[in-house]
Amino acid sequence: MPIYLVGMMGSGKTTIGKLLSEILNKKFIDLDYEIEKKEKKSIKEIFAQKGEEYFRNIESEILEKTENEDAIISTGGGIILKEKNRNILKKYKTLFLYVSVEELIKRTETENRPLLKSGKGKLYEIWDKRKKIYEEFEKINLSGLSPYESAAKLLYKIYEEKIEKIDNDFQNVYIKIKGLMDLKEKKNIFVSRSVNRIYIENFNNPYILDDGEIIKDFNNVKKIYSYLIKNNASRNDIIYAAGGGTVTDLIGYVGATFKRGIKTEFYPTTLLAQVDAAIGGKNAINFEDIKNVIGTFKLPDRVIIDPLAVISQKEENYLEGIIEAFKIAIIDGNISLFLDNIGRIKKRDLDIIIEIIKYAVKVKLDIVSKDPFDNNMRRLLNLGHTLGHAFESYTGISHGLSVGWGIKEEIELFSKNINKKDKNIILEFLEKIIPEEIYNRKITLEELKKYILQDKKIENSEIDIPIIKKIGKVELKSINISEL
């Protein structure tokens, strides 16, 4: 079945349509491109030589031919002017991509469009004539959103709700398509600013948290305590966290300490949080520039993972989650899921993202359930973290990319006996995922010393380092800090 995108010129129909086709693994059709191909002329030339009416007739002819296509189809801005076209569009899923006229003007300033030759003020006139017709279709407000953020929001209109429990006896974790919609009628919701900006319709008067590690401090803990007291939150209430790992870390810590423990539910929205921070019950805040140095072990009462939210992430943040999941695969051994699907991973194919989430969560839960308080086996999950955390604190580079760098450096320093084939497989994948300037960043242990010495894993001047023997076999080795 076709999915049509309609909207004003500059609303992003072609750009977002291409992304959706990759995410959903569907064919993409751009009606304007098909018209140019048929006429062997540009749109501008068709308007100039044969007029708008001729163009509209060709447009209708080509639209009819797409009815049997299982594709994402971007249309021209004026496709909705003909009743014949509207009748076709209304038979199928058709989404109106709304962007404010002010933003459309900014977007089209450098473009050469036939209908705008008399000036950008023409956009207001076109919008006034067409807005009632556009609003016959399902409207999605994409003002201020990036292409990936827009695609993620559109997926909420394409997919039906679907829920699946991750099979384990340790933690209540569910994968739920459109899971964020659960929060519409909830109170005591703590949401990252970026998530609220995209999914604002899904929240009712939430507490907004800034994005990033900056929120993980005592100042924010105190503010949240005050907020909960003001709202008479009891131990029987639930506090909800929607955002990345910084949000789940902070709210997990608050949940563990407020009134000696209050119920929490996590709605992790980044891939990194979905496969790592929200899983296993570790909660922490930072103190004196040291990451996660104060924290608790307390499982959230429920975790709802919405894969659609992953699509909204910036490229760097999305890749952080891939690295974390790949780390888990190195420990478990099933790296073929990553190696065989590198193209689909980079395109954010939703089916492969869901498969990666399910796999990584199941493996992590299996490990954590055998060692919930991080005394032995769970420490295997610290692969890349000893140098990675120090690198993150020293450089300010994000957690997932720092861990990727840490895996590479720890292999070179500690995994002396790993066979060359496995080493190359791991390093080649990381090199494809981590930005070159980070992957090749040179730094000395002396520069990282201050941060390594504050590592929570140090006991009696020794630290357990996960050593890769081979893919699927990682062991802990105690190393004296002085030797390191």
Image (cartoon, grey):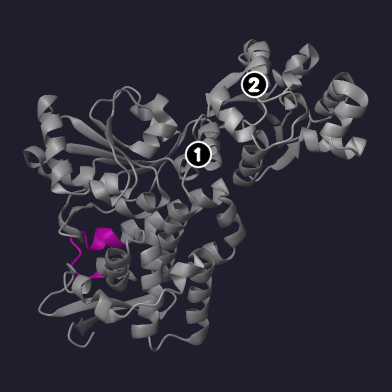
Q: Evaluate whether residue 278 shows in this view.
A: no
Give, as a single range, the part of the protein colored magenta: 367-377
**Residue at screen point 79% across, 31% down:** 68
- CA distance for labels 1 and 2: 28 Å
Quadrant of the image containing the C terminus: bottom left
**Which residue is disc 2 drawn over?**
121
Left or right relative to 327: residue 88: right
Quadrant hosting residue 96: top right
Amino acid under disc 2: Gly
Amino acid under disc 1: Glu
Q: Would you place residue 462 above or below residue 340 in this image?
A: below
- Front residue (pair 249, 75): 75
Q: Secondary structure at mark 1?
A: helix
Quadrant of the image containing the N terminus: top right
Magenta region includes residue 294: no
**Which residue is disc 1 drawn over?**
149
Q: Secondary structure at mark 2?
A: loop
- Front residue (pair 197, 228): 197
Disc 1 packing (10 Å; few <14; some 14–19; many ≥20): many
Which is more foreground, mark 1 or mark 2?
A: 2
